[in-house]
């Protein structure tokens, strides 16, 4: 009974349920074609700025090479000037060893010189004859003024040299001093002229040979 009741109920529900209405198919519109991508127009090349041509530099004149400067002449050794008859002239050199300064004094016998704290006098000078080996000497006397100490009186002059100085052989009797140096450079003196040589006999013109007498004509 129960099964028959269930079958009847199912049949009623099937009869009462309306049949599904067929819905019309929805047609989706077709997608529009993609818009064409615009192609960029080719860019025109940027104009190249015109470069102004640089003016050519004017040609410089060629410098004429300067002539080579002549080498400076070596300092000449001071030589006493030629003295007058009966005169003697000596050249005395003085050096300050601390300062490196020098001085030359051209003196005649009895004349004085002054250099720093030194003062001196040349009594005389001698030299050998021209035909002998050259040797010059001068008798010189030199004194020094010692430095004055503060608060004390000025000291007296002190003799530092008195003797002969030799130009060609200074080691024979050198001037010795811790600060100064004195030496003889040269001595010039006039020697009397010797006897004059006899005059050469005058040459007489040679006599021409006498012409030979003409021979008599032959017969």
Image (spheres, rainbow, N blue to C red):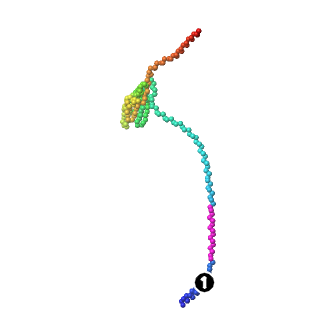
Label 1, residues with CA under 10 Å away: few <14, some 14-19, many ≥20: few
Residue 143 can be seen in this image? no
The one nearer the camera, 152 or 78, is 78
Q: Residue furthest front?
A: 219
The N terminus is located in which quarter?
bottom right
Front in this rendered view, residue 173 or 93: 173
Splitting the image into 4 quarters, where does residue 177 fall? top left
The residue where tag 1 is placed is 18
Please report the residue visible at 61 percent of the width from the left and 49 percent of the height from the top. Answer: 52
Queried whether the magenta region covers residue 39, the answer comes back as yes
Q: Quick check: 7 left or right of 177?
A: right
Quarter of the view holding residue 79 = top left
Q: Secondary structure at mark 1?
A: loop
Residue 128: x, y in percent? 41, 26
Instruction: From the viewer's perspective, tell me whether residue 84 is left or right of residue 24.
Output: left
Q: Is residue 47 visible?
A: yes
**Which quadrant does the C terminus fall into?**
top right
Q: Residue furthest top?
A: 219
- Which residue is found at the position 62% from the left and 56% from the top? 45
Residue furthest bottom in the image:
1
Who's the residue at 58% across and 87% down the image? Answer: 11
Q: Is residue 212 above or below residue 186?
A: above
| Stretch in magenta | 25-40
- Give left or right: position of 205 versus 163: right
Give percent across and percent down for residue 121.
Answer: 40, 29
In percent of width and height, residue 207 lies at 53, 15
Look at the magenta stretch and give its main secondary structure: loop
In magenta stretch: residue 33: yes
């Amino acid at each position: 009974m129960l099964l028959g009741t269930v079958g009847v109920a199912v049949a009623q529900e099937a009869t009462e349920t309306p049949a599904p209405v067929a819905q019309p198919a929805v047609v989706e519109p077709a997608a529009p074609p993609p818009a064409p991508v615009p192609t960029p127009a080719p860019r025109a090349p940027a104009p190249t700025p015109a470069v102004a041509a640089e003016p050519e530099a004017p040609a410089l004149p060629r410098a004429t090479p300067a002539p080579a400067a002549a080498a400076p002449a070596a300092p000449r050794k001071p030589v006493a000037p030629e003295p007058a008859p009966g005169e003697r002239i000596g050249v005395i050199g003085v050096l300050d060893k601390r300062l490196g300064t020098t001085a030359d004094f051209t003196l005649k016998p009895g004349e004085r010189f002054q250099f720093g704290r030194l003062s001196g006098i040349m009594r005389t000078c001698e030299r050998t004859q021209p035909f002998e080996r050259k040797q010059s000497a001068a008798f010189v006397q030199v004194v020094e003024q010692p430095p004055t100490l503060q608060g004390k009186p000025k000291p007296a002059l002190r003799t530092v040299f008195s003797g002969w100085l030799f130009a060609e052989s200074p080691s024979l009797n050198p001037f010795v001093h811790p600060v100064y140096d004195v030496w003889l450079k040269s001595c010039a003196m006039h020697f009397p002229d010797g006897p004059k040589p006899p005059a050469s006999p005058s040459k007489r013109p040679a006599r021409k040979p006498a012409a030979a007498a003409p021979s008599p004509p032959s017969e």
